[in-house]
Image (spheres, rainbow, N blue to C red):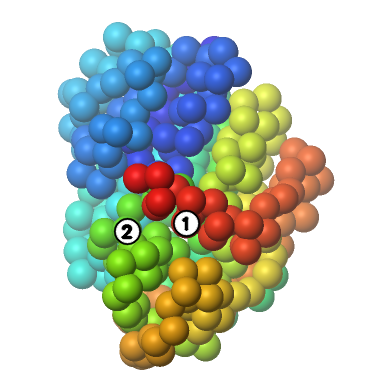
């Protein structure tokens, strides 16, 4: 299949590109490299250095590559940044998505990376897909994206699969900026610096990037018309996250503790029973194994 992956130089999507190419698909990448990295690009993928907010350039990509499947990961991904910059959040996450959907007349399937971590309100324990209640610009923008995809799927007659990710972590995650706490802690701890732990009792549901990739492979053929959570269904407090990672890196100092930041939720864990039922998917990588792989990646780089 001819698959167009947006954000394909970024953390999650670059792994998906690799997996699609490995099983024989013809892949192209759209990325403006604002947060992605050229070193993440698979040399076998056709690369378009394009911002999805540019309607004309997006149209040219579709005309040139003629994708059968679109896998849409390009986004502003930081909850904290979305509070600081609401307009940019909606320009990228909503208008950028519309620009893609407008070109999907010949597309057979649209796969979308939404959010589970920011979708279900301030406290969401084993949240299922039924009751979205975002409390940040980031969460609202992703919910709008989901609704737009469902509308355009009817108008242009393509299939869709929507994934709501828990907190994805793994190799290639960007340690710069506000998002990606595992990568941020890895960068600091590997150089003996002290991380800041915000809202130490808040919880997150962490899922390894390799498990997310498996779901995106399954979504090429399965799950049409479904919205599915992807996570482990397990809560880890921010304090415990620091403790486990500090032990891994041999860091013996205390963390800096600070209050929660605007827009961030208190508790998150996702009910992933729908993904298991529909796709036969489950997260097989436990957190301890995942952070070992992250540490190895930092050592290699």
Horizontal side, residue 177 vs residue 162: left or right: left
Q: CA distance from mark 1 to mark 2?
A: 13 Å
| Residue drawn at the location 44% of the way across and 18% of the way down | 27
| Residue drawn at the location 53% of the way across and 14% of the way down | 25
**Residue at label 2?**
175
* Of the two numbered discs 1 and 2 in the rendering, the one whose residue sits closer to the viewer: 1
Q: Is residue 34 above or below residue 117?
A: above
Give 55 or 164, whichever is nearer the viewer: 164
Give 91 or 235, whichever is nearer the viewer: 235
The quarter of the image holding the C terminus is top left
**Percent x, y of residue 297:** 44, 48
**Percent x, y of residue 109:** 55, 25
Q: Which mark is residue 255?
A: none
Q: Is residue 87 visible?
A: yes
Give 39 or 103, whichever is nearer the viewer: 39
Tally of numbered tags: 2
Categorize mark 1 by other alpha carbons within 10 Å: few (<14), some (14-19), many (20+): many
| Residue drawn at the location 64% of the way across and 37% of the way down | 214
The quarter of the image holding the N terminus is top right
Categorize mark 2 by other alpha carbons within 10 Å: few (<14), some (14-19), many (20+): some
The local secondary structure at tag 2 comes to: loop
The local secondary structure at tag 1 comes to: helix
Q: Is residue 133 above or below residue 123?
A: above
Which sits earlier in the primary sequence, circle 1 or circle 2?
Answer: 2
**Percent x, y of residue 268:** 58, 73
**Residue at label 1?**
295
Is the Cβ of the residue at disc 1 closer than 8 Å to that at disc 2? no
């Amino acid at each position: 299949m001819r698959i167009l992956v947006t954000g394909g130089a970024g953390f999650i999507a670059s792994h998906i590109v690799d997996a699609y190419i490995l099983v024989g698909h013809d892949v192209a990448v759209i990325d403006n490299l604002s947060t992605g990295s050229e070193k993440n690009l698979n040399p076998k993928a056709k690369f378009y250095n394009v911002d999805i907010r540019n309607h004309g350039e997006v149209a040219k990509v579709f005309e040139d590559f003629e994708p059968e499947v679109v896998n849409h990961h390009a986004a502003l991904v930081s909850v904290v940044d979305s509070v600081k910059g609401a307009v940019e959040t909606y320009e990228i996450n909503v208008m950028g998505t519309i620009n893609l959907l407008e070109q999907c007349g010949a597309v057979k399937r649209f796969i979308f990376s939404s959010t589970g971590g920011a979708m279900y309100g301030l406290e969401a324990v084993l949240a299922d897909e039924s009751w979205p209640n975002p409390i940040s610009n980031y969460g609202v923008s992703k919910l709008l994206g989901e609704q737009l995809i469902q509308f355009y799927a009817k108008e242009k007659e393509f299939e869709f699969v929507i994934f709501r990710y828990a907190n994805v972590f793994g190799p290639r995650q960007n340690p710069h900026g506000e998002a990606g706490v595992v990568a941020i802690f890895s960068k600091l701890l590997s150089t003996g610096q002290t991380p800041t732990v915000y809202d130490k009792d808040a919880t997150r549901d962490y899922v390894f990037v390799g498990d997310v990739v498996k779901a995106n492979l399954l979504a090429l053929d399965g799950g049409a018309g479904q919205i599915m959570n992807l996570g482990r269904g397990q809560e880890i407090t921010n304090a415990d996250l620091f403790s486990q990672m500090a032990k891994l890196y041999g860091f013996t100092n205390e963390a800096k503790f600070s209050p929660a930041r605007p827009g961030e939720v208190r508790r998150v864990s996702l009910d992933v029973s729908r993904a298991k039922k529909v796709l036969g998917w489950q997260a097989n990588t436990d957190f301890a194994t995942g952070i070992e792989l992250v540490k190895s990646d930092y050592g290699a780089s």
